[in-house]
Amino acid sequence: MTNKKSNTNATEILKKSDLVLLDNVQFIYELSLAELELSSLGIQYKTTNGLREFEILNKSIDTIELVKTKSSYFKTVDKFYTDYYHIIEKNTTSSINQYLTHWIYPYKGKFHPQMIRALINIIGLKEGDTLFEPFSGSGTTALEAQLLGVNLIGIDVSPLCVIQGKVKTQSIFAFDEILSLKGKVTDSISTNLFSIEKNYYEMLDDLTENETAKDFYKLARLVAVSDNSRRNRNFSTSFVKNLDLMIKSVKFYLEIKDKLELNLGNISINIGDARNVDLPDNSVDGIITSPPYSIALDYVQNDEHSLSDLGFNVSELRENFIGVRGNGKNKLNLYNEDMEKTYNEIYRVLKPGKFAVIVIGNATYQGNEVKTVEFTIEYMKKLGFSLENNIDKIIFGLYNVMKKEHILIFKKDGSL
């Protein structure tokens, strides 16, 4: 293994090999993931100092460098800060989990980025491997895969989600164009510009042919639309403030890419249906996803203001979303049927011997708990998966849809 990123002295490294957890690691599931991640990276270890530090038993230049560049839960390896510590410092928000471009747009039920980084390592994905996300959502998995040099194919039925994922992962490649447009866009802000009489999106088409830059400014508007709709904030003030933060976040991403010499993964996110995936059989190296909790949380209604602003017919979109069709028992039956189709596709496109991670919880619908976790485990086993790990994850802030999720790690039977 090459050591191109490290300026450390071999003698200094081998004097001490303790790993120190990040200060924000507080929950049992995080410790479980940290240990699984170390094992998956080939690190032999023992815990010390009340489970806050780890000693590497097979210490070497290579093992320390591997933890330094790939790990998710550690602040330091020996006396050296990990890459992840440097990454989370690039943050325009007060939340440690919203670094780089993760924060852009207030999407309900976002993945924890640190958890996703760990899971990518735990299922053994390496630079150049391909990860599939059938519910790409706000783009968390896409961004974390990109940072680790893992390629990702993501699909989502929501055009709003597709824009989010693209902006968070592709804006660094159009940064000069984004900067050149800022003055033209902000100079055009007026009461009339954002009214029905004048179309903001048509204005973007007139300003540039760069689709990545256009997506960036589309999402900048939608952040302000959301602020105005949900928090009654002044539209123009929110637009200017958040646009500056978005540009700063992309600049941070470029800085950390150069500082850490990251080989970014190739990211492709498009409109798609998880029940009918346009990928060949046995074609992806891993899957990480969280099915929508739409039987309890109506994603279409939640983002109606942004979807309508983009010009979409929300009623028509609802027909394509899993979990929002039907009523009562029929709604649950339709949801289960759709999830069976999704799990069939997950099995079909995943290579034999590879892993699929499903993060899911039992939601409450009409006063009753829906046993989604048990349903998922049973059906995945019927398909030919074995359940390798089932990790409880306490969750906060998901608007009381549920109190606990399960991180289910399945392995597809067979070998390559």
Image (tube, rainbow, N blue to C red):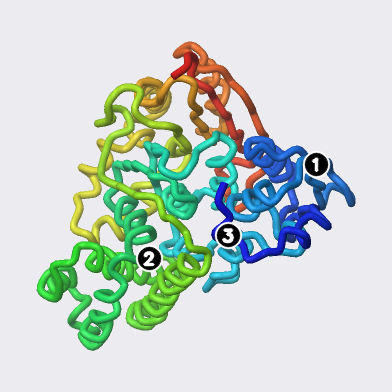
Quarter of image, res 176: bottom left
Q: Nearer the viewer, mark 3 or mark 2?
A: 3
Residue kind at label 1, given as amino acid type: Leu
Q: Which of marks 1 and 2 precedes in the sequence?
A: 1
Judged by depth in the image, the label closer to the viewer, 2 or 1, is: 1
Q: Secondary structure at mark 2?
A: helix
Camera-nearest residue between 131 and 114? 131
Query: The residue under label 2 is which amino acid type?
Result: Ser
| Number of dots carrying numbers | 3
Residue at the image position 38 percent from the left and 44 percent from the top: 152
Residue at 87% of width from left, 47% of height from top?
48
Mark 2–mark 1 Cα distance, whole angstroms, equals 50 Å
Q: Earlier in the sequence, mark 3 or mark 2?
A: 3
Q: Does 118 sit left or right of 346 as displayed? A: right
Give the position of the C terminus as an image quadrant.
Answer: top left
Residue named by callout 2: 226
The three-letter amino acid code for the residue at tag 3 is Asn
The residue singled out by tag 1 in the image is 57
Rendering quarter of residue 263: bottom left
Query: Looking at the image, which is closer to me, 286 or 135?
Result: 286
Q: Which residue is mark 3?
A: 97
CB atoms of marks 3 and 2 within 8 Å: no
Sooner in the amino-acid sequence: mark 3 or mark 1: 1
The kind of secondary structure element at disc 3 is loop
- Residue 121, horizontal then vertical, whole percent: 57, 41
Considering every residue shown, the one lying at the far right of the view is: 49
**Nearer to us: label 3 or label 1:** 1
Q: Is residue 109 visible?
A: yes
What's the distance in space between the residues labelled 3 and 1, CA to CA?
Answer: 30 Å
